[in-house]
Amino acid sequence: MKRPFTLAALGLLTAASFSASAQIVLDGKVAATEIGTGTNRYQLASTYTGTHSVTGKGLQSLYVGASSTKLYVMIVGSAETAADYPGYVLYLNVPGKNGVAAGTQLKGGAAGDSPLKHTPTMDMETDYGVRATLSPSAMTDVYYSFVDYTNGNAAPVADSYQGAGKKDGTVLTFSATTGPFAGARAALVKSADLTAATAAGSGLELEFDLAAMGLTSTSQINLMVGYVKDGGAFTSDVLPQVVGQTTDLGSSPDFSTLAGRQNITYNLSTGILASRSAVASALKFNVYPNPSPATATIDYVVSGKQEVALDVFNSLGQRVRSIASGSQSGAQSYSLDNLASGAYFVKLRVGENNTSQKIVIQ
């Protein structure tokens, strides 16, 4: 097992850490050596910063990465409860497949005991759904299945059970031998609550075979993840986060009606949020110098008068500083200093537009 990534460890990182030879290891945790840019590195895709409708449980952050043959998804969070069967769900849109069009309600999975039976309306084409359902805390199993929406959506679709794994990071290989999830693997590490999960970088880690899914090293995918209750109802916790959501979203939320994009774009060759570059350009968002020896400058421009949030996160998705919040207009500039050496993400939200930039403090 690799060493968990903690806040203390982050302070020891330098830019060189992100060019090390280590690669992603499937074990239900994200470590500092796995985060960076390029092949076999995780990139932070999204972070949950709001109030969780289930106290102490839900999602903290989402990472996505790829090697020359595999796609990796790491969900940092805490799902296990004392008596129920909550779970994590992942929805995917991949190129070359004809799934359910954006704005069309999913009929859900046919298995009555699977959280994939819920019926959301997505704002992206949806080809596949994957779930991991955790048994109560006194039990050791986590149950996996997937649904394939490329075969139609006229009625609840087959919910293909893939086996029972453990909550200790042991790797489970899906039972599918053909189709998009042939060779897929999963590992999950349970935690007492979100605080413990964040400190350890633990949760659900998934590995998919690129060839089986029809992907190449230059493919672009869309994805969304959620934390769901026993019975399939979405809690408040989905990534990307629904800003201001503090109560459960229910069994049939319509994500297509929300402002902005309720999905994340990942290009296997260029990385996370490639399609958001236009947002950064329009906002004239810049964090410099990068790397920074001590103090960096953050600049951006707010068109008209809009609500703004400017925050700094470490590589595990923990917010370490809130720089600006509230209504702003025009050119803005802030100094970023007194941070320990390491890598951080500066995230800017202006109205419904979101963008981020990684910076290394030396």
Image: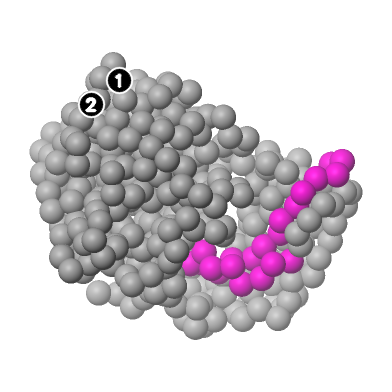
Residue at position x 25%, y 56% in the image: 84
Residue at position x 43%, y 49% in the image: 235
Crowdedness of circle 2 by 10 Å Cα count: few (<14), some, many (20+)?
A: many
Q: Amino acid at mark 1?
A: Asn
Q: Is residue 112 left or right of residue 206?
A: left
Q: Which range is magenta?
A: 303-323
Crowdedness of circle 1 by 10 Å Cα count: few (<14), some, many (20+)?
A: some
Decide whether residue 152 is among the magenta residues.
Answer: no
Label 2: which secondary element: loop
Q: Position of residue 254 (x, y in %)?
A: 49, 31
Q: Is residue 109 left or right of residue 39?
A: left
Figure disc tally: 2
Q: Which mark is residue 153?
A: 1
Q: Is residue 87 left or right of residue 120?
A: left
When the figure is inspected, residue 307 is found, relative to residue 57, above or below; the finding is above
Label 1: which secondary element: loop
Residue at position x 88%, y 52% in the image: 331
Name the residue nearer the viewer: 335 or 108.
Answer: 108
Q: Which mark is residue 157?
A: 2
Name the residue nearer the viewer: 23 or 231.
Answer: 231
Residue 153, quarter of picture: top left
Residue 130, quarter of picture: top left
Q: Position of residue 29 (x, y in %)?
A: 33, 66
Q: Position of residue 260 (x, y in %)?
A: 61, 36
For the C terminus, give its image quadrant: bottom right
Q: Amino acid at mark 2?
A: Val
When the figure is inspected, residue 17 is found, relative to residue 353, above or below; the finding is below
Task: Return the residue found at the far front.
Answer: 83
Distance from disc 1 to disc 2, alpha carbons, whole Å, reads 7 Å
- Judge whether residue 211 can be spotted in this image: no
When the figure is inspected, residue 112 is found, relative to residue 143, above or below; the finding is above
